[in-house]
Every structure is written in structure tokens, then in C-alpha cells.
Image (cartoon, grey):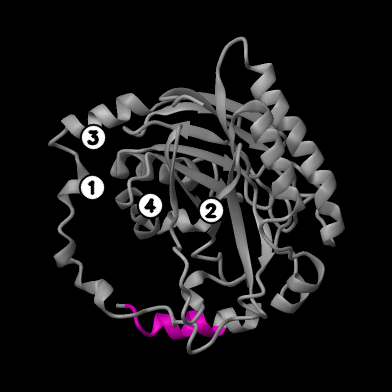
Amino acid sequence: MSPATRYYAACCQTDFAKPSTRRDIPARVDRMLELIDSAVIGYEPFFPVRLVVFPEFAHTPPVYNTVRELEEHLAVPVPNEHTHRYSLRARHHGIYIQTGTFLEKDENYPGVVFNTTCLVGPGGVLARYRKTHPWIPWEVHASPHDIPGYAEDPFPVVDTELGKLGAAICYDWLFPEAIRQLALKGAEVLIRVSAYMDPWGTAAPLDWWTLVNRCRALENIAYVVAANQGARLANYPPFSWPGGSMVVDFDGRILAQAEPGPGERIVVAPVDIDALRAERARRRGHHMLSHLRTELYSGYSRPIYPRGAEQIPHSVEENNQLIAKAKEHTW
């Protein structure tokens, strides 16, 4: 398949009922495959949709307070039969899919659950990204940071015919350091798989969702394709989920955004990789990636949040203990 340097990305919001077991996943995948068809086929007379992105919690949210419960009721291995179905649909349409998140169990890390999204292409799973900054204290799944001897790349970037793609999940995006890792590895399209709740969503005065997406785009000279959870309060309590999925260009301009509010939405916008590469090559001013004075940042020379060698959290209570310990290392 020839490279597509100008194409359209589609963010597909979901609005599912709260699951209780992994048996609920297949029906969700059924609906997301329908949304993929809607995005690719429905918009075909107007736009060549080649990248489809789903939100965090699209398969399963962390609805239990302990790792043991997550592992027992919701966690699945990755890859799995669901990622295989996405691969078949990606091959059929000639597209790339950034899946919603799975709660993942891996036999290499017993007793641990990750929050994981996959980049799936026509040939199968291309990358697996595990959330590096769980939304603590409520999220009790692990970060790669927590695992002693973790040897996999925590920030994978994949060189595809659509450009260099890198993904991160929700709360990761409030840490510029995490997204900068993807950009320094060459990511041209930064994909946000998110479940961002009110009041930190699309409405002033706390419209963090919009603000952060635009900042990460302009400071890394990269496109941001950001799919946000659109679940109603009744579906994923105790929060309501404002949607507002969006695509932002490398100067922080919003190219398209779904109407804020819960519910299923599909929003599409253009991605021009040639234009991005030309700007990265031409610019001298506001080229933050090349202006980094890395040796100045001495604050990163000391640890703050405890590493997993000390304690891997398995409950909300243990998360609270680690947060208190980390606070002792700040300021």
C-alpha cells in the first residue's frame, strides 16, 4: 500500500453501559466495528479516513478498587481475539485503528494489571502502549514504571505509511514529559486515548481537555488526534464524561471537534504529514524540540514517586499511601 501523507483521522466516541465481567467485551467490539465502518464508508465520498481512534475505557473501565478484582473479572491478555477482529477490519478497509483500552494481564508480570491500548494495522497489532501515569488514587492498575526490571519500551512509536504514530492514555497527557518522549522518538501524530471527566473537560473555566491537547500539539510540533469518552453519568458513575473529541494541528489549531456532551460521536479532520515535515525542517523559531536545554533540568535527577521495587500498589488504599510518600519528595 502506498504512503498516504495527507489523509483524514476519525475520533469515535463511545457510550456503553458499565461492564461487570469480560463477557461484556465482545458486544462492545461489535459496536466499535460498526463505528469504524461508519467512519470509513460513510465519509468516503468526502474524506479518505485512514486512522480511526477510540477512547479509554471503550472495552473495560477499572470499576473495581483492587487489582485482584480487576484481574478476576475484567482483565484479558493482549493481543487477543478482539484485537484480531480489529486487524481483520483494518485489513478490509486499509486503515489503522487505535483501540480503546483493555485491562491487560500478562503472564510475564503476575499479579499486575495494565491499562493498555493497541495500534492495529492491516497486518495486526503494531504496538502496545501501557498507561504510564494511572489516575491515582482511583486507578489501581500498574505503570511500567512500577515493575522492577521492566524491559519493554514504555513509549513505542511506529513508523507507518500514515507517518510516525505514538499513543498515550488520558492522564499521561498532564505530564509533558511523557508526551515529549514520543515526540523525541519522532512521533508526528500523537494519539490520545482518553476518558476525561467533568469538570476538567470541554467547558470553561476548567477546560483542561482542550487546553492540554492544544499545548501538547504546539510544544511538540505534532498533530494530536484525541478521542474522549462520551459515557453518560448513568453508564460510568460517579463521573459524567463530556466527549469533545478533537483533532489539533501542529500549531495548536483545532481542526475539528465533536459537540461537547455525552453520547456516541464521530469527528473527522485532515492530517497533512508533508506539511508537518516541511515546518519541522524549515523552522528555527518556536522549534521547541531542538531548543531543549536538557542539562538544566536538575529536578529530574532525584526520584519523586516511589519505584515498584519498594511497593507495587494493588488497591486505592495503597495508592494513597504512595501519594503521601511522594509528597515528601516535592518542594
**Structural crowding at the residue carrying mark 1, measured as other residues with C-alpha within 10 Å and reported as few (<14), some (14–19) or many (≥20):** some
- Asked if labels 3 and 1 touch by Cβ distance under 8 angstroms, the answer is yes
In the image, residue 117 lies at what x, y percent? 60, 53
> What amino acid is labelled 3 in the image?
Arg
Q: Mark 2 points at which residue?
A: 170
- Residue 230 visible to an observer of this rendering: yes
In the image, residue 204 lies at what x, y percent? 49, 41
- Mark 2 and mark 4: span between their CA atoms? 15 Å
- Mark 2 and mark 1: span between their CA atoms? 22 Å
> What amino acid is labelled 2 in the image?
Cys
Q: State which tag comes first along the sequence, 3 or 2.
A: 2
Which label sits on residue 182?
Answer: 4
On-image quarter of the C terminus: bottom left
In the image, residue 19 lies at what x, y percent? 82, 56
User: Which residue is found at the position 72% from the left and 46% from the top?
Assistant: 84
Dividing the picture into quadrants, the one containing residue 35 is: top right
Q: What stretch is highlighted in magenta?
A: 321-330
Q: Name the residue under label 1.
A: 289
